[in-house]
Amino acid sequence: MKRLQDKVVLITGGASGLGAADATLLAREGAKVIVTDISDDAGRAVAKRIGGEFMHHDVTQEADWTRVIAAVLSKHGRLDVLVNNAGICRVGDIETTTLEQYRLMAAVHGESCFIGCQQAVQVMKERGGSIINISSIAALRATPPVLAYAAAKGAIRALSLSVAGHCRDKGYPIRCNAIFPGVIDTPLVVPVVGANFPGAGQPEDVANMVLFLASDESRFVTGAEFVVDNGATARLAA
């Protein structure tokens, strides 16, 4: 039996990078994967390659979330795993970041994660499920060149803890955890840190953690934070 046999999994931002790696691995482990993204061609290509489904999805729009969740429930009758992965990054420190850029980061990361968690809790609270939010080590250490991105990822950290606590207090069989990737070789990160960044991880390194949190192996894990950065955060603290 595969680790995610027949689990229904929704992955946002699944057209490339971490999301595509998640989709590939989780499908290989038996999941029914729904890839969502605003990049239609790339998203369809990933879904076709893994034998999954694709839906256009602007994660900043609540109506899009409602449509996507409804479509998943209509076809599959449930949602077992939500991976809030969609993201973008803009370079800018406290002096150069515009309010527009700050609000964009907040919408794509923090607000989208809020909407996704809110709707997932409603559809998972009877049967149970796993919510996996992708934050960043930018939420754990000083990253002046990407201030707005770091702040938005910090919001995901706080949100994840509160969602986990709420579900536990209510007795909902829902787990909510956050993953904090370091520098990973993806189309999101390379334009910021440059190609051939020393010590960069691979998308599969994060996907393996997503797999653990999506599977029943993590049934007693909620409100936890998983840093996948090859010790970068620890080195800073030292």
Image (cartoon, rainbow, N blue to C red):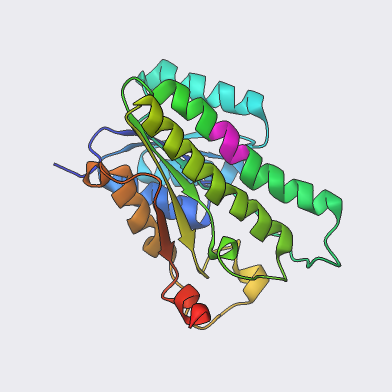
Front residue of 140 and 33: 140
The answer to whether residue 1 is above or below residue 235 is above
Do we see residue 9 in this rendering? yes
Residue 31 relative to residue 122: left or right = left
Quarter occupied by residue 33: top left
Residue 55: in magenta span: no
For the N terminus, the quadrant is: top left
Q: Work out which residue is located at the far left of the displayed protein and give it.
A: 1
Q: What segment is highlighted magenta in the picture?
A: 112-116
Looking at the picture, how far across and down is residue 118, in whole percent? 53, 29
Residue 45 relative to residue 142: left or right = left
Residue drawn at the location 80% of the way across and 53% of the way down? 101
Quarter occupied by residue 52: top left
Do we see residue 56 in this rendering? no
The answer to whether residue 181 is above or below residue 114 is below
Residue drawn at the location 81% of the way across and 65% of the way down? 94
Quarter occupied by residue 39: top right
Q: How many marks?
A: 0
Residue drawn at the location 33% of the way across and 47% of the way down? 213
Residue drawn at the location 61% of the way across and 49% of the way down? 155
Looking at the picture, how far across and down is residue 132, in whole percent? 43, 44
